[in-house]
Amino acid sequence: MSVAIMLSLFWAQSAAAVDSPSMSNIENTPALPTDSQTIADNKIEMPRRFAVTEEQKSKFVSEVKDLSRQIKTDPTNSKARLQRSLDCLWLGRYSEARRDCDSVLKTEASNVDALCEKACANYYLRNFSNAIYDCTLAIGCEHDCRSAFHILDLAERAQLLKLEIQYIQNRQ
């Protein structure tokens, strides 16, 4: 399965997960389905990653191991790094995914898949400004990149909500 299709599937479940946040009242947090998790330290609710069954999880884990072996033999294999990054995203290993994307971007600065996957990892690591920056770079490289626009939308909403929470906390 291609990286773009898998990334689209990853985001498909969270596409409807975030409604427009009401910025007028902090108590009106974005309406999310019951599969959301609350980030305790700043009350921002984020859509959970795509649900992975135990069978799928073991498949992704074994694929990560295989890809790691391939990368050890050929450290410049950007295709294997991108696939491992995507598998890490599915497993919730966001720091590892971001590291692989950074490795790809060192050699291919305009790799849209790497930028989108890095933005996704940054989003789930709550580095919203970095996610926005990566999406902007991806859109600059490929103007009709739907994945980048979707991640950008989610990251901008989360960043605004985070800033509103900080503003209200500072006023008290």
Image (cartoon, rainbow, N blue to C red):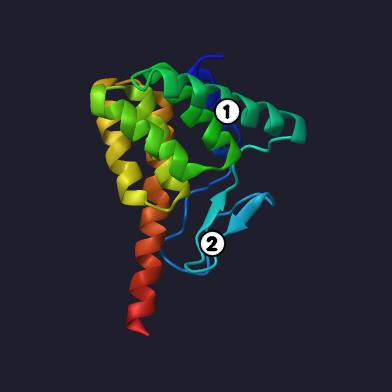
Q: Quadrant location of residue 122?
A: top left
- Amino acid type at circle 2 is Ile
Mark seen at residue 39: 2
Given residues 27 and 84, the one toward you in this image is 84
Element on which disc 1 rests: helix
Across and down, in percent, residue 71 comes to: 43, 23
Across and down, in percent, residue 136 comes to: 27, 35
> Which part of the image, by quadrant, shows the N terminus?
top right
> Which part of the image, by quadrant, shows the C terminus?
bottom left
Q: Quadrant location of residue 62?
A: top right
- Amino acid type at circle 1 is Lys
Q: Residues within 10 Å of mark 2 (few under 14, many from 20)?
A: few
Q: Residue at x 68, y 33 (%)?
A: 57
Indicate left or right for 15 with 161 as reference.
right
Is residue 109 in sight in this rendering? no
Circles 2 and 1: CB distance less than 8 Å?
A: no
Mark seen at residue 160: none
Across and down, in percent, residue 84 comes to: 50, 27
Q: Nearer the viewer, mark 2 or mark 1?
A: 1
Element on which disc 2 rests: loop
Residue, disc 1? 65
**Up/down of 164 relative to 145, above or below:** below
Q: Residue at x 58, y 54 (%)?
A: 31
Indicate left or right for 103 with 50 as reference.
left
Sooner in the amino-acid sequence: mark 2 or mark 1: 2
Is residue 103 in sight in this rendering? yes
Across and down, in percent, residue 25 comes to: 46, 68
